[in-house]
Amino acid sequence: MTGLTALIRRNTKLYFKDKGMFFTSLITPLILLVLYSTFLGNVYEDSFRSALEAAGASVSDELIWGCVGGQLVSSLLAVSCVTVAFCSNLLMVQDKTTGARQDLTIAPIKGSTLSLSYYLSTLCSTLLISVGAAAVCLVYLYLVGWFLTAADVAALLLDVVLLVMFGTALSSCVIFPLSTNGQASAVGTIVSAGYGFICGAYMPISSFSEGLQRVISFLPGSYGTSLLRNHTLRGVFQEMESQGFPTVVVDAIRDSVDCNLYFFDKKVELSGMYLVLVASILIFVGLYIVMAVLSGKKHRG
């Protein structure tokens, strides 16, 4: 345990000392928040306002921006919890390119301990940044329109923790076989550019074609996004209902922003979303363990 603790401390310190890697991870959520609120905020506002006015409902700006803010915040956290994990996990590749991993394997340290240290240090670093990003997002919601309860905030933080665990497990499996910085950069670029679309953060899944919606329904990241949506927007929808909004209108808005997800036309409940996310974490962690064990046998052979 002492060796594992020392490795986790060493990996975490190296990550935060690498100014380029650390600041890239740190500013990514902040840049996304600025971009989302600047460019997507007005788009979401017009969309919500036109939908509600078409239904003959009169809404306050605070309620509109509470809805807009909830969608923006959930999109940001859904993306950053995973992409930051990929940035944090780049130390695994850097140790290979600098020869540090070879030096560590010469020392009396098991390969499984080394692999576990990369996973846990990435988890700690990503969780620290993601929780900080969540705090900034909560401040943003407080400024534009606050409809959250303490239970909503607690559920939101739980979603962040689970998504960080998912992102860490996924990035560990993807990055483990890589051996050069070029490969790592290419993977990071692909993930940063594409993950937001396939998880429904940039565009609601409901806006895709039926065939694409069914494909995306198999991807665990979309359920993480929906969980965040539900917990950032629950209070908004409750306020709409208390103001006498027709149930059909509220349900239509929930569908349009992916609070309601469907697996082959069957609605997935929140418990099912949690089950999918937890199961995917266990599957990717198991795959990472298998990859680490097989790699250790190959080096010993």
Image (spheres, helix red, strand yellow):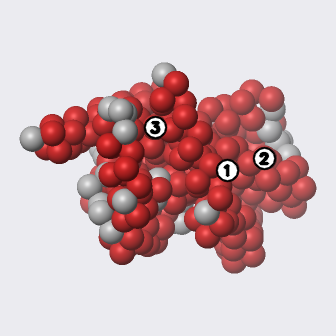
Where is residue 7? Give x, y as percent: 50, 38
The single residue placed furthest to the top in the displayed view is 1
The local secondary structure at tag 1 comes to: helix
Image quarter (top left, top right, bottom left or bottom right) of the C terminus: top left
The local secondary structure at tag 3 comes to: helix
Of residues 271 and 60, the one nearer the viewer is 271
Disc 1 to disc 3, C-alpha distance: 18 Å
Q: How many marks?
A: 3
Q: Which mark is residue 117?
A: 3
Residue under numbered circle 1: 129
Query: Few, some or many C-alpha atoms within 10 Å of disc 3 (few <14, some 14-19, many ≥20)?
Result: many
Residue type at mark 1 is Ile
What residue sits 65% from the left and 58% below the top? 17
Choose the circle earlier in sequence order: 1 or 3: 3
Residue type at mark 3 is Ser
**2 or 3: mark nearer the eye:** 3
Residue under numbered circle 2: 135
What residue sits 66% from the left and 66% below the top? 19
Disc 2 to disc 3, C-alpha distance: 27 Å
